[in-house]
Image (cartoon, rainbow, N blue to C red):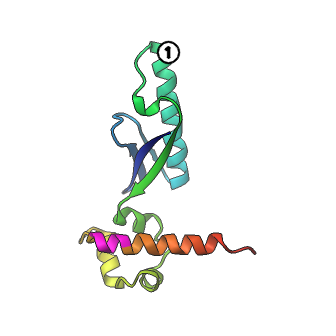
Amino acid sequence: MNVLHATIESLESGYSAYIEGLDGIVATGATIEEIKARLINALEEYGAYCKEVGCDLPEELKGDYRIEFSMDVKSLLTIYKGIFSKSGLERLTGINQKQLWHYANGTSQPRRTQVLKLENALHRLGAELLSLHL
C-alpha cells in the first residue's frame, strides 16, 4: 500500500492541504474535516481525469493508498486554539505558555525536541481518551 503524505497549513481565512510530490493535488476549507474530504475528492477526480484523457496515473495513486496528514506547530496551535488552551498545553507538554504563544504567532520556530514533546503529549492524551468508555 502506498502512503501519501499530505501537509495541512493554516491560512488567514481557513486551511489548505497538498500532497507532497503530486503537483496540483490541493484542497482548501474552513475545517480539517472539510479539507480531508476535499483532498480525497481531488485525488478521486484526478484519477478519473487521467482515465478519461488517457494520461499516466502517478505510481503513488496506482493500487491502494492511504493518506498521512501532518502540519506544523503553528498550524496545529491555530487550528485547535478553541480546544486547547495554552495553560492546558503547558500542563500536557511542560512547554511554557509564553513559548507556545510565540509558536502560535510564528515569532519563534520550535526545536525538534519541542515538536516531539508536543506531539507525544497529544498522542498520549488521544490514547487515554480512546481507552475511556462513558
Of all residues, the one furthest to the right in this rendering is 134
State the count of labels: 1
Q: Which residue is mark 1?
A: 52
> Relative to residue 93, is residue 7 depicted above or below?
above
Q: Amino acid at mark 1?
A: Glu
Front one among 67 and 26: 67
Q: Secondary structure at mark 1?
A: helix
> Relative to residue 39, is residue 88 depicted above or below?
below
Where in the figure is residue 41, as x and y percent of width and height?
A: 53, 36
Where in the figure is residue 62, as x and y percent of width and height?
A: 48, 29
Front one among 99 and 57: 57
Front one among 28 and 68: 68
Of all residues, the one furthest to the front in this rendering is 1
Secondary structure mostly taken by the magenta-highlighted segment of the chain: helix
> Relative to residue 50, is residue 91 depicted above or below?
below
The C terminus - image quarter = bottom right
> Relative to residue 127, is residue 93 depicted above or below?
below
| Residue 114 sits inside the magenta stretch | yes
Residues in magenta, as a range: 112-116
Q: Report which quarter residue 59 is drawn in.
A: top left
- Report the residue at 38% width, 75% height from top: 117
- Report the residue at 52% width, 47% height from top: 36
Q: Label 1: few (<14), some or many (≥20) within 10 Å? A: few
Where in the figure is residue 52, as x and y percent of width and height?
A: 50, 15
Where in the figure is residue 30, as x and y percent of width and height?
A: 49, 53
- Report the residue at 30% width, 80% height from top: 99
Front one among 62 and 42: 62
Question: Is residue 31 something one can see in this rendering?
Answer: no
Q: Report which quarter residue 3 is drawn in.
A: top left
- Report the residue at 26% width, 71% height from top: 111
